[in-house]
Image (tube, rainbow, N blue to C red):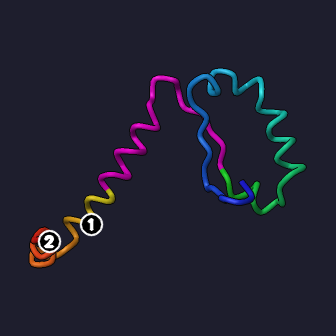
């Protein structure tokens, strides 16, 4: 967390099912290891096992790249890039 500084951490899968067992220890470890500003700005939450957040994240990334790298370009630029 100190290196990446995420605004949100989501536990899912087996970790979500066991989160109540590890939450107190995890939060106390974070309090000891991180400055208060990092702890305050990061939300920690759980999602049910039936939500596949990895696939959703990959799809969102792919669609974002497609939008930025293909559809946001003018047609002339796309055509020039496609021409060998």
Name the residue located 74 percent from the left edge and 58 percent from the top edge: 2
Residue at image coords 40%, 37%: 55
Q: Is mark 1 on a helix, strand or loop?
A: helix
Disc 2/disc 1 C-alpha distance (Å)? 9 Å
Let me know if residue 53 is in the magenta part. Answer: yes
- The segment highlighted magenta reads 43-63
Report whether 29 appears left or right of 4. right
Is residue 59 positioned above or below 40 on the image? above
Residue 10 x %, y %: 59, 40
Q: Name the residue under label 1.
A: 69
Name of the residue lying farthest toward the right: 32
Image x and y of residue 46, in percent: 60, 34
Label 2 sits on residue: 78
Across and down, in percent, residue 41 comes to 69, 58
- Taking 15 as reference, is 1 above or below it? below
Relative to the observer, which residue lies in front, 13 or 65?
65
Is-magenta flag for residue 69?
no
Residue 61 in the figure: left or right of residue 81 = right
| Label 1 Cα crowd, 10 Å radius (few <14 / some 14-19 / many 20+) | few
Say which quarter of the image contains residue 79: bottom left
Instruction: State which tag comes first along the sequence, 2 or 1.
Output: 1
Residue at the location (46% across, 37% down)?
53
Q: In which quarter of the image is residue 21?
A: top right
Residue at x-position 70% and y-position 27%:
19
């Amino acid at each position: 967390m100190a290196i990446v500084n995420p605004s949100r951490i989501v536990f899912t899968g087996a970790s979500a099912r066991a989160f109540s067992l590890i939450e107190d220890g995890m939060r106390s470890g974070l309090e000891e290891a991180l400055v208060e500003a990092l702890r305050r700005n990061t939300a920690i939450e759980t999602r049910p096992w039936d939500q596949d957040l990895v696939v959703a994240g990959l799809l969102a990334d792919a669609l974002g790249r497609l939008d930025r790298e293909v559809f946001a370009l003018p047609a002339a630029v796309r055509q020039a890039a496609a021409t060998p």
